Image (cartoon, rainbow, N blue to C red):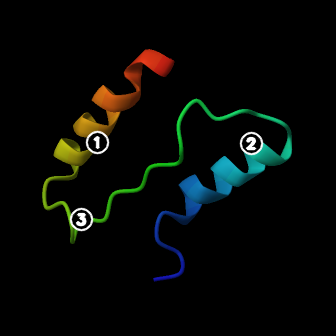
Amino acid sequence: YDTFCAAGKHAYQLLGDIGAKPLANCFTIDVQEHPVPEDAAEAWLKRVINRF
């Protein structure tokens, strides 16, 4: 639906609008694709942790 993860997407856009440079792309988790969202989050974090 059109407001899926809207707060995070909006914050990502606002930060970009004021010149912030992302360390990683905005990451969203759809619970219909990932029944245990923590697993998807952990996998993503392992891929990007060195950027922080």
Q: Secondary structure at mark 1?
A: helix
Callout 3 crowding tier (Cα within 10 Å): few <14, some 14–19, many ≥20? few
Give percent across and percent down for residue 37. Answer: 22, 52
Residue beneath disc 3? 31
Q: Is residue 17 above or below residue 30?
A: above
Q: Quadrant of the N terminus?
A: bottom left
Residue beneath disc 2? 15
Residue beneath disc 1? 41
Q: Amino acid at mark 3?
A: Val
Q: Residue at coordinates 53% horizontally, 75% vertically from top-left?
A: 3
Cβ–Cβ below 8 Å for labels 2 and 1? no
Where residue 15 sits, quadrant-wise, is top right
Q: Residue at coordinates 24% horizontally, 35% vertically from top-left?
A: 42
Where residue 45 sits, quadrant-wise, is top left
Q: Earlier in the sequence, mark 2 or mark 1?
A: 2
Give percent across and percent down for residue 11. Answer: 66, 50
- Most extreme residue toward the left, as rendered? 35
Q: Earlier in the sequence, mark 3 or mark 1?
A: 3
Q: Amino acid at mark 1?
A: Ala
Q: Marks 3 and 2, how far apart in space?
A: 26 Å
Q: Nearer the viewer, residue 10 or 27?
A: 27
Q: Secondary structure at mark 2?
A: helix
Q: Marks 3 and 1, how far apart in space?
A: 11 Å
